[in-house]
Image: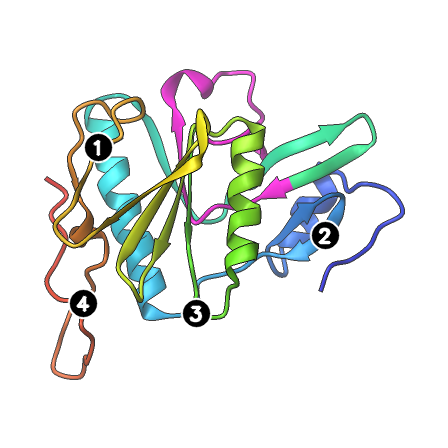
Amino acid sequence: MATVRTKPITEEELLRMSADRPVEVVNGEVIPAMTAASIAQIFVIRNLFKLLDDYAGKHELGYGLPDGLHYILRDDSEGIKGSRIPDVSFIRKGRMTESLDPNKPFRGAPDLAVEVVSPSESDETTLDKVRDYLAAGTEQAWILYPSAEELHVYQRDDPKSIRVYSGDDILEAETLFPGLKLAVKAIFVIPTGPRTKNRFRGAPDSG
């Protein structure tokens, strides 16, 4: 449930409130952030983060970041009007400057924002996040559906077009990760064992 405030939240309040449970800010209202609850979600987040961060680090492109970082997408002199916490994100190397305060949220949108959808999350809620990211300057937003093993790509320069990847498809995001050829099926792998009964098999190859 959203918390209606008489004035926008500050960065300090945002971090303090998130110490108990992560929250986001939508149109000035504080709402609980969706957190991964299933094994599939956790491993999809882990797999993609590792694949992107390894590649970005190897090629000195920037930084893949896991769930937990607040991005201030919209604010004014009164306080924060919009803040999101993507499940995975990417920031180009040139944006990590010495002027950044490491004890505060990141001011601005990630270059890539990724959301991994839970069965209880509505399509409208997920799309609201995508709209917020793209409106704030995110170049691409990816939505991952573990149950369907699909990756949907939204682009800021073509927001009405959606590209859907699954199975043996290879994702190339040349403007973000030049030369990367990401096997989509590698994202949706979870480990298996004698007590594991899940249709996701194998282990991802981060190459």
Return the mark for residue 119: 3
Q: Residue furthest front?
A: 160
Q: Nearer the viewer, residue 1 or 126?
A: 126
Q: Position of residue 76 (x, y in %)?
A: 77, 27
Q: Nearer the viewer, residue 99 or 25?
A: 25
- Element class at badge 1: loop
- As for residue 97 lying within the magenta part, the answer is yes
Foreground label between 2 and 4: 4
Quadrant, the C terminus: top left
The structure residue drawn at horizontal position 49% and vertical position 61%, both measured from the top left corner, is 35
1 or 3: tag closer to the N-terminus: 3
2 or 3: tag closer to the N-terminus: 2
2 or 4: tag closer to the N-terminus: 2
Return the mark for residue 200: 4
- Element class at badge 2: strand
Q: Mark 1 packing: few (<14 Cα in 10 Å), some, or many (20+)?
A: some
- The residue indicated by pointer 1 is 172
Q: Amino acid at mark 4?
A: Phe
